[in-house]
C-alpha cells in the first residue's frame, strides 16, 4: 500500500538532464586523467562553474535535500562534458514556484519551476577567481594558479536553455 505525504514527509525527486557543457568536476578532480594544456583546463573549469550556477539556481526558493546520481557524458581529461544528468530531492515540493519572466503574473510550479531554475543558471556569464590546474608550468610542479575565469553563458535566453533541459518528476518511489 502506498504511503502518501499526509502520513509522513516524502521528498519529491526530479531527474534533471542538461545538454551542453556542464560538469560537476573541476579538471583536477576528474578520475579519467588530467588536462594536458592550460586551455583544456580552463574549458573544463568553465563547465564546473556552470554546474555551480545551476545548483545555486535550483536552490533559489528551497534548498534541495540532496543532489545525487550524477552522470556526465562526453567528459575526458582533455574535453569538456556534452551533457549531465542528476537527481534532486526536495522535502517540500509545494514551495517550488517561480514567476515566469516571459509571461508576467504567471507562476511555474513543480518540474516546470525546476527547469526554469536550471535555465536561469545557464543564461548569464559568470566571472570568478578560480584555482586552475596548469599542466604547462613544470617549474612550480604544476601547482594550481588562482586566476580570473569567465564562463560564458551557455544559452542566450531561458527559452533556448529550456529547450536543452529535461526535468522529470519521479513518482511512486515508496510503496
Image (spheres, rainbow, N blue to C red):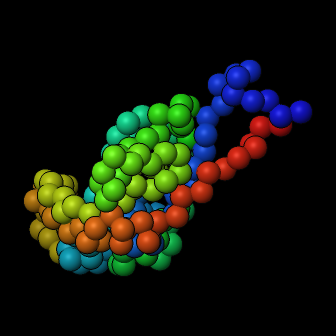
**Of residues 81 and 145, which is closer to you in this image?**
81
The answer, for residue 148, to whether it is visible in the render is yes
As drawn, is 76 to the left or to the right of 126?
Answer: right
Question: Of all residues shown, which one is farthest toward the top?
Answer: 7
Q: For the point 44% across and 71% down, which residue is it? A: 164
**Of residues 23 and 28, which is closer to you in this image?**
23
Q: For the point 57% across and 50% down, which residue is it? A: 14
As drawn, is 104 to the left or to the right of 64?
Answer: left
**Of residues 3 and 147, which is closer to you in this image?**
3
Where the C terminus falls, by quadrant? top right
Q: For the point 65% across and 25% down, which residue is it? A: 9
Q: For the point 33% across and 64% down, which residue is it? A: 158
Query: Can you give x and y, in whole percent of width and height, for residue 71 in the image?
Result: 54, 62
**Of residues 15 and 117, which is closer to you in this image?**
117
State whether residue 163 is above or below residue 68: below
Question: Of all residues shown, which one is farthest toward the front?
Answer: 105
Q: Quadrant of residue 45?
A: bottom left
The answer, for residue 65, to whether it is visible in the render is no
State whether residue 56 is above or below residue 25: above
Query: Can you give x and y, in whole percent of width and height, for residue 131 in the image?
Result: 19, 55
Q: Quadrant of residue 163?
A: bottom left
Query: Can you give x and y, in whole percent of width and height, for residue 72 in the image?
Result: 50, 66
Query: Can you give x and y, in whole percent of width and height, for residue 7 in the image?
Result: 74, 21
Q: Quadrant of residue 77?
A: bottom left
Amino acid at each position: 500500500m502506498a504511503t502518501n505525504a499526509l502520513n509522513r514527509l516524502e521528498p519529491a525527486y526530479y531527474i534533471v538532464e542538461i545538454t551542453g557543457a556542464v560538469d560537476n568536476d573541476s579538471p583536477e578532480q576528474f578520475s579519467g586523467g588530467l588536462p594536458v594544456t592550460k586551455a583544456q583546463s580552463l574549458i573544463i573549469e568553465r563547465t564546473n562553474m556552470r554546474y555551480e550556477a545551476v545548483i545555486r539556481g535550483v536552490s533559489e526558493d528551497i534548498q534541495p535535500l540532496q543532489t545525487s546520481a550524477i552522470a556526465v557524458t562526453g567528459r575526458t581529461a582533455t574535453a569538456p562534458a556534452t551533457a549531465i544528468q542528476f537527481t534532486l530531492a526536495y522535502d517540500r515540493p509545494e514551495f517550488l514556484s517561480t514567476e515566469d519572466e516571459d509571461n508576467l503574473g504567471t507562476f511555474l510550479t513543480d518540474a516546470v519551476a525546476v527547469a526554469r531554475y536550471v535555465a536561469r543558471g545557464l543564461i548569464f556569464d559568470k566571472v570568478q577567481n578560480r584555482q586552475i590546474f596548469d599542466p604547462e608550468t613544470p617549474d612550480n610542479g604544476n601547482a594550481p594558479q588562482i586566476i580570473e575565469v569567465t564562463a560564458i553563458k551557455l544559452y542566450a535566453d531561458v527559452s533556448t536553455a529550456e529547450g536543452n533541459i529535461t526535468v522529470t518528476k519521479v513518482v511512486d518511489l515508496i510503496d
